[in-house]
Amino acid sequence: MIQRITLRRPDDMHLHLRDGAMLKGIVGETTRHFARAIIMPNLERPVVTAAVALAYRSRILAALPKGAVFEPLMTLYLTETTDPADVAAAHASGLVKAVKLYPAGATTNSNSGVRNFDAVRAVFEKIAEIGLPLCVHGEVTDPSVDIFDREAVFIDKVLDPIRRNTPGLRVIMEHITTSEGVAYASAGGTGLAATITTHHLIINRNHILAGGIKPHYYCLPVAKRESHRLALRKAATSGDARFFLGTDSAPHVDAAKEHACGCAGCFTATNTVQILAHVFEEDGALPQLEAFTSLNGAAFYRLPPNDSTITLTKGQPAGWPEKILTEAGPVTVFNPGYPVHWHVET
Ligand code: NCD
Ligand code: ZN
């Protein structure tokens, strides 16, 4: 039985760091274990141009805990007025690694996102030409579509047509939650990949709704039924290069989560690595953990894997704070609902 495992230092290929007091309060939770992260651009004032992205990057670097070695990989928030030339300049800077597509209204701070996908064709064509990946929040926003079906409908009605119309477009299906998402990513060829979160490997929709509503398990895309969770587990633990970790760790203060209209987002930065070791061990897949956390994502983003490593050991039940206390307010850390025995050595 494996009791100790060393991995290349992980990358989080989908992370919300926010800004201001929240950024300062939570960034150290990521830098403790991760070397790099793809930084989501859905700030209250979205990160829509190269200049805004570089300014945000500087604020992130200024907020790092003393001694932290961490590279924020920036993204641009796609709007119907995004200028393809600005995107190309962002790419040329070497600091912006993807464009993020939010269907307008799909999730937190997505109102400036895309309503008419034809309006952004010129950007799709430019990024296909320069090889910059498109990170896609894959849910339709049509209120007549059931929330549990929104990912599968998006794949058929939006994503597949975009990919057919834009040869060469490199796409990352962000935080997939369904067996349809796994199947589509698996069939898509070399220009397609998918991130999977930590929490979607652990919870299904019963965890949110059965025995009382659990606001800290509510995120978007919402967790689906158990068969989908099992499909995600199989994909994540398979070692298949198309699947990699994007935690989607998305801090909201408790007051915004424990609310009559609670915000979407699970905060998993603190305990993701420990929980993933548990999940992969449970599925007999510890040898594939490094591919999921540290190799597959870097390869898709055409980055070298990190040279530094982390070591996990198995022992007493691991502890982590129940909440991270920030100057913006307390943020509840994701609770997997069972003890986790893996520790990251310091
Ligand atoms: C994210 C957030 O809070 O910014 N929330 C979430 O539930 N995942 C946005 C997102 O990635 O959809
Ligand atoms: Zn997200």
Image (tube, rainbow, N blue to C red):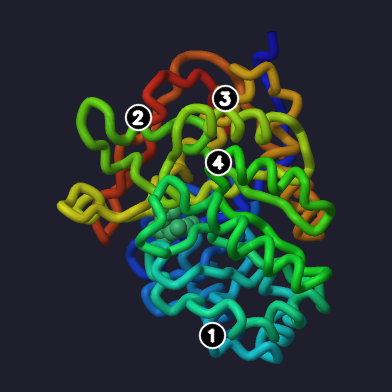
Amino acid at the residue labelled 2: Asn
Gap in angstroms between the C-alphas marked 2 and 3: 19 Å
Answer with the quarter of the image where residue 206 lies. Answer: top left
Which dot marks residue 80?
Answer: 1
* Closer to us: 179 or 42: 179
Amino acid at the residue labelled 1: Glu
Gap in angstroms between the C-alphas marked 3 and 1: 40 Å
- Cβ of mark 2 under 8 A from ligand 1: no
Quick one: label 3 or label 4, which is nearer the N terminus?
4
Residue bearing the label numbered 3: 279
Amino acid at the residue labelled 4: Thr
- Side of 335 relative to 268 (left or right): left
* Closer to us: 160 or 131: 160
Say if mark 3 contacts mark 1, CB within 8 Å: no
Quick one: label 3 or label 1, which is nearer the N terminus?
1
- Side of 4 relative to 250 (left or right): right
Question: Could you classify mark 4 by the number of other residues whose Cα lies within 10 Å: few (under 14), some (14-19), or many (20 or more)?
Answer: many
Gap in angstroms between the C-alphas marked 1 and 4: 28 Å
Amino acid at the residue labelled 3: Val
Q: Can the viewer see residue 66?
A: no
| Image location of residue 73, percent across then percent down | 64, 65
Residue bearing the label numbered 4: 178
Which structural element holds mark 4? loop
Say if mark 3 contacts mark 4, CB within 8 Å: no
Residue bearing the label numbered 2: 206
Give the foreground label among 2 and 3: 2
